[in-house]
Amino acid sequence: MNDQIYFTTIAIIYCILNMITIIFSLIIVLTIAINWKMHFCSVSNLLILNSSFVFFLYAISCFIQTPLMISNNNNINLLFCQLCGFFGQYIAGTQIFTFLAQAIFRYFATVLYRQKILLTFRVNTIIIILGWIIPLIITASLLVLPLAYQYEPESRICFTSTKYLLGALIVSIFIFFMPLTIIIGLYGLILWNLTHFDRFQSDANNIIRYKRNIKVFHNILLIVAILLVCGVPYLLCIIINIISETPWILYSIKTLCISLSIALETLVLFFTNGKIKKTLYEKIGFHQTQVQAIQSRKNKSYQ
């Protein structure tokens, strides 16, 4: 009974986090897509659109498995479990590669901005496509390993099990650590470039570019920090399983942390993008109401 209450509570928190992800990622996707030609026709917004769409898909994949947490049914269809585990892991991996695509573009825009071809839609669209293909190849290759995607009674979901070390290590190395190392390396080069800004010609365009890159760098650094912190429980499960047996409660924490990471990253993308917020508020009339309220207070102060 206590276990059932625990997993029901976890399922409720899981649903809340995924609902936050669905709502805000869908808002970002629809706002950018509907107003693409008028306000959002840029490579940076294309990358944000790509990340938000991946967040939306991951939350949907989580909702598909939510009933498993409550039902406590160990007789899960093997094919269904493998497909759910594969899809969830593929989207989770693609999510990290969307941040890698943003890091590559920001490196182009900050360090190699004189190479105009690197800032074009064509080049960055190719990078985005590769960011979908590479994790697909890695996660699909795990399907030949019969124990890679399996139902975990401790977390009550189908995912890449940390009990099966070969599959878990492949995912950790090629989908998490390698792209994350490249991301950190690129942002390290960007930071070095920004701190040596005085070496460049300080004309008006360079100053504007510098301020814009500093702001974007801070925002994306926050996302990378969230990704690192929330990925720790999954790494702990792998390490502990190598040494001994992982406490069963850590499996649920690992699952929740991944969804928490996605939810926080979605909120960061929304609340740090002033153009998306402004466009959305104008569409729903919030901006106009706010302006009227300010104007009304000013009129009262003059009376």
Image (tube, grey):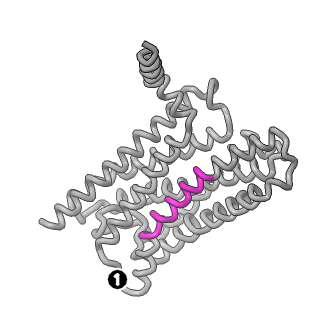
Which residue type does callout 1 highlight?
Glu
Q: Position of residue 112 (x, y in %)?
A: 81, 51
32 relative to 170, above or below:
above
- Judge from the rendering whether residue 204 lies leftward or rightward of residue 148; answer left or right: right
- Judge from the rendering whether residue 210 lies leftward or rightward of residue 94; answer left or right: right
283 relative to 86, above or below:
above
Name the quadrant containing residue 150.
bottom left
Q: Position of residue 95 (x, y in %)?
A: 53, 53
Outermost residue to the front: 303
Whether residue 231 is visible, yes or no, is yes
Of 241 and 9, which appears nearest the observer? 9
The residue that mark 1 highlights is 245
Task: Look at 36% across and 62% down and name the residue there.
Answer: 158
Task: Look at 46% across and 46% down and name the residue there.
Answer: 267
Q: Is residue 223 magenta?
A: yes
Q: Position of residue 91 (x, y in %)?
A: 49, 53
Task: Look at 38% across and 66% down and name the residue there.
Answer: 254
Q: Which residues are magenta?
A: 218-234
Of 206 and 99, which appears nearest the observer? 206
Helix, strand or loop for the magenta stretch, by majority = helix
